[in-house]
Image (cartoon, rainbow, N blue to C red):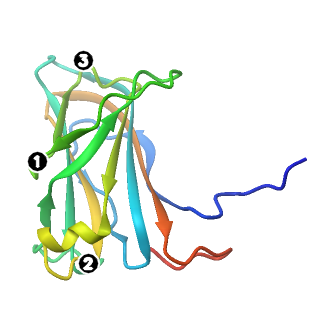
Amino acid sequence: MKDARFGIGEQIVPLKAPVDSAATDFATPYVSLKNALHATFFYYAGVVTAASDDQHIVITMEAATSAASSATEVAFAFKYRLSGATGTDTLGAIGTATSAGYSFDTSSADGKMLIIDVDPAALEAALPDASHVRMVVNIDGGGTVTLNAIWAVLDPAYPQLTQKSSS
């Protein structure tokens, strides 16, 4: 049997457990990218329902200079891919979201994953001295069920058995 890897070489950061966030906006904890070469954030939508199809879930990414919310966070543009339905291995084309974020309607979100690419070196353009990033999720008030989970995978600059903190 091959040796188990348990994510060695990657740092996995759970940010939101898979629970219902119906009509409730939220932001994840900040993730420190000080010791990361690259970061990928995953937003996974489970069952999503709303009063009408024109109600959206908007995902934005914010950069900050510390892990504490200080009202100086800055939203930034990002690259993303949207998966096909759960149980498939298809990914959409690479897209670019503005700092206003990525929006998808509730009729097409079920069982899809939004994969967001964050280059720590590019954060400086959004906010000088930025070192922390978080995902902000705005759910339309008409959302009746919005099951979702969020995590990040970092490529650490110094991989080791006990990773340097990213919180």
Label 1 neighbour load within 10 Å: few <14, some 14-19, many 20+? few
Q: Position of residue 1 (x, y in %)?
A: 91, 47
Furthest toward the right, the residue is: 1
Q: State if disc 2 and disc 3 touch (CB < 8 Å).
A: no
Q: Is residue 18 left or right of residue 1?
A: left
Residue at left 38%, top 52%?
A: 41
Residue at left 40%, top 23%?
A: 84
Q: In the figure, 162 relative to 26: above or below? A: below
Q: Position of residue 125 (x, y in %)?
A: 13, 70
Q: Find residue 98 and name its label.
A: 1
Earlier in the chain: of badge 3 and badge 2, it is 2
Foreground mark, 1 or 2, reads: 1
Q: Find residue 68 and name its label.
A: 2
Query: Distance between the Cα atoms at labels 3 and 2?
Result: 35 Å
Q: Position of residue 101 (x, y in %)?
A: 15, 46
Query: Distance between the Cα atoms at labels 1 and 2?
Result: 24 Å
Q: Is residue 111 left or right of residue 81?
A: right
Foreground mark, 1 or 3, reads: 1
The disc labelled 1 sits on which kind of residue?
A: Thr
Label 3 neighbour load within 10 Å: few <14, some 14-19, many 20+? some
The disc labelled 2 sits on which kind of residue?
A: Ala
Residue placed most toward the observer, 103 or 21: 103
Which quadrant of the structure image shows residue 102? Answer: top left
Label 1 element class: loop
Residue at left 10%, top 74%?
A: 72
Label 2 element class: loop
The disc labelled 3 sits on which kind of residue?
A: Ser
Q: Find residue 107 and name its label.
A: 3
Label 3 element class: loop
Residue placed most toward the observer, 160 or 52: 160
Earlier in the chain: of badge 1 and badge 3, it is 1
Query: Distance between the Cα atoms at labels 1 and 3?
Result: 22 Å
